[in-house]
């Protein structure tokens, strides 16, 4: 028989908790705090060192510190990604705009910019475009339209594993063109699990089907300006540089590359994870569409049609994005809780990236960084594309694009000529490459979702992801400019 003294036990716990803060057992600082302090110390040290060199203006030095701090925080994730984006805007306002007129801050030469310049990304058209895209995706998910269409299309491909895998990847990629690849993967993994359960245990085909979903979702993120945040950031930076890329033009440029990579990934996955039982047949799960679902399909169709014909009716893609916002919220199909559940952190992250690019351009830091890049055009394109994929393998693809897009566009503007890649080619290449880093389970949220199901190992992602990434680099470098030049005339 055990005698318990609850009050005495609770008092011991309380004293043990208090002694940690009384100096008897000092608590260990969390890893994130140490990483944050390291990032602050490194960026501050760089600022102090640059001030001693007298080689850069005061504003460029401050911006270099902000850039290094943002890079370290995004790479280490010492702060949430969106928190770093907010910090960028705050630091730019204080150090560059200097609204308080404090000594030693602001621009050393000329007038400091108004602080509202750094708040402008909050209302950037790209943010409005993404907001409308999020609402559209939310309605599709809420009414089960995604499951119904996926089941319908999968039935058209029959039950053979090769065809089912192709159908699965096509559906995932198409959905990922119009909604978050994370939401797409979460939805498609749910649909594919019952299919995988039909496969004998230990058959490689089960792993192949699970991998097909995140890889297709990542590749589908290339397809439209709203498919992934790097695409939207690239469009915004190009607009600031005086180069306009319409919704349809982006689709015409990206979809051929997307289709080629999707085909390659499908054949590679099936070759590596070929089923042991050649006679196996798979059946998709049916799902019905009700009246509300058909209304969502109608609004979706009209919105996409307007996006693709923006040069005809003259409405910008951001303005068109407000149509589904009104159509779903005014009718009550999307409620306040639905709007509150949107991925606001992604919008904030995009804002921070736009503000970072603005600050680099205004202070001239982008030109300084460009001076360190080799001037051979094809070499620069390869360096930036490979660097984007490598960075995106370990950090957020949006963060990687935020860091590299301003540098790439600045290089292109400073080295305009027939032998060098132009701003449009460099910006689109970097944005597309950011979607193609998938060699690790942590590389993208779709990879993480698939990995969480417990059937996949890191090596499964690595051997397929490296081959797909290497093929993507070759396609972007060798075919990107040809496709861009075929569809659009690049004029600022």
Image: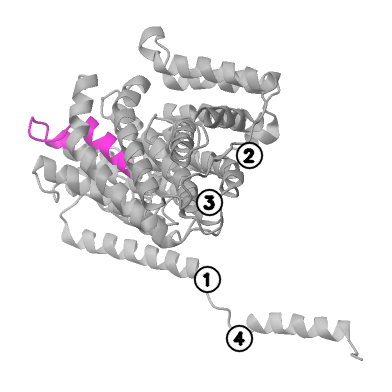
Q: Earlier in the sequence, mark 1 or mark 3?
A: 1
Give the foreground label among 4 and 3.
3
- Magenta residues span 412-433
Asked which secondary structure carries label 2, the reply is loop
- Residue at 39 percent across and 63 percent down: it is 40
Crowding at mark 3 (Cα within 10 Å: few <14, some 14-19, many 20+): many
What's the mark number on residue 341?
Answer: 2
Q: CA distance from mark 4 to mark 3?
A: 38 Å
Q: Is residue 374 left or right of residue 211?
A: left
Marks 3 and 2: in contact by CB < 8 Å?
Answer: no
Q: Earlier in the sequence, mark 1 or mark 4?
A: 4
Q: Earlier in the sequence, mark 2 or mark 3?
A: 2
Residue 259, above or below 367: above
**Residue 364 horizontal/vertical position (percent):** 22, 42
Tag 4 residue: 25
Q: Is residue 480 visible?
A: yes
**Where residue 30 is drawn, which disc sits there?**
1
């Amino acid at each position: 028989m055990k005698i318990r003294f609850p009050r005495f036990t609770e008092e011991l716990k309380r004293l043990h908790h208090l002694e940690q803060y009384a100096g008897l057992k000092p608590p260990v600082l969390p890893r994130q705090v140490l990483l944050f302090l390291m990032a602050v110390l490194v960026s501050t040290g760089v600022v102090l060192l640059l001030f001693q060199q007298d080689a850069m203006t005061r504003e460029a030095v401050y911006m270099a510190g902000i850039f290094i701090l943002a890079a370290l925080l995004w790479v280490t994730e010492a702060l949430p990604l969106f928190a770093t984006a907010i910090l960028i805007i705050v630091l730019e306002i204080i150090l560059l705009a200097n609204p308080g007129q404090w000594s030693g801050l602001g621009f050393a030469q000329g007038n400091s910019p108004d602080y509202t310049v750094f708040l402008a990304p909050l209302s950037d058209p790209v943010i409005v475009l993404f907001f409308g895209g999020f609402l559209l995706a939310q309605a599709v998910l809420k009414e089960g339209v995604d499951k119904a269409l996926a089941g319908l299309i999968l039935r058209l491909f029959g039950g053979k594993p090769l065809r089912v895998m192709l159908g699965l990847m096509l559906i995932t990629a198409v959905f990922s063109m119009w909604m978050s690849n994370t939401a797409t993967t979460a939805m498609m993994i749910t649909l594919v699990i019952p299919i995988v359960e039909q496969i004998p245990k230990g058959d490689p085909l089960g792993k192949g089907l699970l991998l097909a979903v995140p890889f297709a979702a990542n590749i589908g993120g290339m397809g439209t300006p709203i498919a992934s945040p790097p695409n939207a950031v690239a469009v915004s930076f190009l607009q600031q540089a005086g180069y306009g890329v319409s919704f349809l033009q982006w689709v015409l440029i990206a979809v051929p590359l997307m289709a080629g990579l999707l085909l390659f990934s499908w054949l590679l996955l099936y070759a590596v994870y070929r089923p042991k039982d050649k006679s196996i047949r798979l059946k998709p799960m049916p799902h019905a569409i009700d009246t509300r679902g058909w209304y969502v399909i109608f609004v979706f169709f009209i919105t996409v049609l307007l996006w693709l014909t923006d040069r005809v009716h003259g409405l910008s893609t951001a303005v068109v994005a407000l149509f589904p916002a009104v159509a779903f919220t005014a009718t009550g199909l999307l409620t306040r809780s639905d709007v509150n559940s949107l991925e606001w952190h992604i919008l904030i992250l995009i804002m921070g990236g736009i503000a970072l690019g603005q600050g680099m351009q205004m202070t001239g830091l982008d030109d300084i960084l460009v001076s360190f890049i080799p001037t051979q055009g094809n070499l620069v394109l390869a360096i930036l594309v490979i660097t984007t994929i490598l960075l995106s393998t370990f950090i957020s693809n949006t963060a990687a694009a935020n860091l590299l897009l301003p540098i790439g566009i600045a290089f292109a503007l400073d080295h305009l000529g027939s032998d060098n890649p132009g701003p449009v080619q460099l910006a689109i290449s970097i944005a597309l490459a950011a979607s193609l880093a998938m060699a690790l389970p942590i590389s993208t949220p779709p990879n993480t979702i698939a990995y969480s199901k417990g059937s996949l190992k890191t090596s499964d992602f690595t051997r397929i992801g490296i081959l797909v990434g290497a093929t993507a680099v070759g396609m972007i470098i060798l075919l990107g400019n040809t496709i861009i030049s075929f569809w659009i005339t690049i004029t600022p």
